[in-house]
Image (cartoon, rainbow, N blue to C red):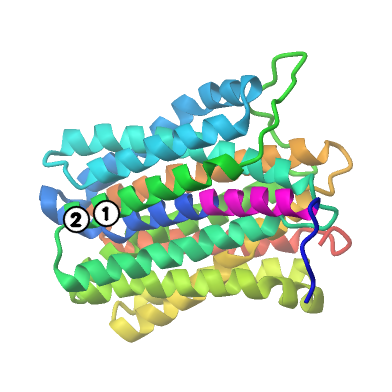
Amino acid sequence: MQLISKTELPRIKHRTAALVYFFLSGFGYSTWASRIPGIQQQLHINEAQLGAALLAAPIGVLITVPFTSNLLNRYSSKSIMILGALFYNVMLALLAFTTHLWQLCIVLFCFGSSRNLLNLSMNAQGVEVQRLYERSIITSFHAVWSMAGFAGAAVGYLFVVSGLPLSVHFLSVSIILILLSVIFYPNTYYILQQTSQRKKFFVWPDKALIVFALIAFASMACENVMYDWSAIYFKKAVLAPKDTATAAFVLYMVCMTTGRFLGDRIVPKFGTHTILKYSGLCIFSGLLTASLFPYIIPASIGFVLTGFGVSCIIPLIFGLAGKSTTMSSGTAIASVSTVSYFGFLAVPPGVGFIAQAIGLRWSFGIIALFGAAIFLLASTIKKDEG
């Protein structure tokens, strides 16, 4: 039996604590996403109104990006992370108690702001903990986020099937996540960032990275469309029962999580270039199938393809960006990450407006074009880069 040395124990504690905060973020967001149809029904709003409400979260993120960046330049990610986790879970609980559209918009604005505060600080914490290890551990944080997303969707499904109200679901999840954040806070890693000059909160990718940034943008757009609209699609377009609609979201999360855990085994065999191309093809085929054949089985197959399609793209793109010869590794990844985050936030609300104008099925068909774009963009990457 191998014993853990005294020098190894502190960094294991730091890594475990960071993993818990990634879990908090993924579980909380998936909890919200799994119950969006319930929120829509509770407020009696149509797709366009829901799309407008969903815009509040990205607005909250974009407005607070420079504020959060400034905080991280002045204080440790440890302090910002606990603040973000508490704020995030309070806003999650409040989402279930909204009774008017304007209330939902205000709470979603705060939810987006808190999510930005938590996500930027926990990613900074992950980078700091990574420096304690010689081997790469950074992908484990994102894998846990996905696993938490699946767990949150599964718990959401159980609450839907049980018939318990939204308030019980969101409030119980929020309380548990707050307790976890407080319990593991002492083990988070403290390091104060020393900055001699004010840093820009956004650096645009250079020519060598723009293709990577566009692929990441398209992938994150599709990923968050699935978070926000998959359950609603099954309910409104497929006409599935409420529990089946939530199960469709769970199915997508299972496939995305499985794909991320299998990625490390598949990529060395086929190569990054090939995986990126066929990931885009899976997204295109999956969303198009769900759009053209709005029935439970073919739409489920479409969601399976989409889940596997989006699973490996972001980790692979970040890996390629980190090899940049024109920018530092950290700056390159940050620039590509920021562009991808715009896709994650800005595209899904547009689905509501498109759905209201021409139908939810065709809005998914249009989003499928992002998968085709990934395939074409990946085809332009030189094989020695991938």
Quarter the N terminus occupies: bottom right
Residue 172: assigned label? 1
Query: What residue type is disc 1 on?
Result: Ser
The magenta-colored residue range is 8-21
- Label 2 to label 1, Cα distance in Å? 6 Å
State if disc 1 and disc 2 touch (CB < 8 Å). yes
Q: Quadrant of residue 172?
A: bottom left
Q: Which mark is residue 71?
A: none
Q: Is 43 located above or below residue 193 in the figure?
A: below
Name the main secondary structure of what is drawn in magenta: helix
Furthest toward the top, the residue is 197
Q: Look at 58% across and 54% down and name the residue there.
A: 19
Return the residue nearer the eye: 350 or 58. 58
Judged left or right of residue 122, residue 268 is right
Kindly state the secondary structure of the residue where label 2 is placed.
Answer: helix
Q: Position of residue 177 (x, y in %)?
A: 39, 50
* Left or right: 194, with 182 as reference point: right
17 part of magenta stretch = yes
Q: Is residue 3 left or right of residue 280?
A: right
Q: Is residue 377 visible?
A: no
Residue displayed at 50% across by 55% down: 23
Q: Residue at x 41, y 61 (%)?
A: 226
Q: Is residue 221 visible?
A: yes
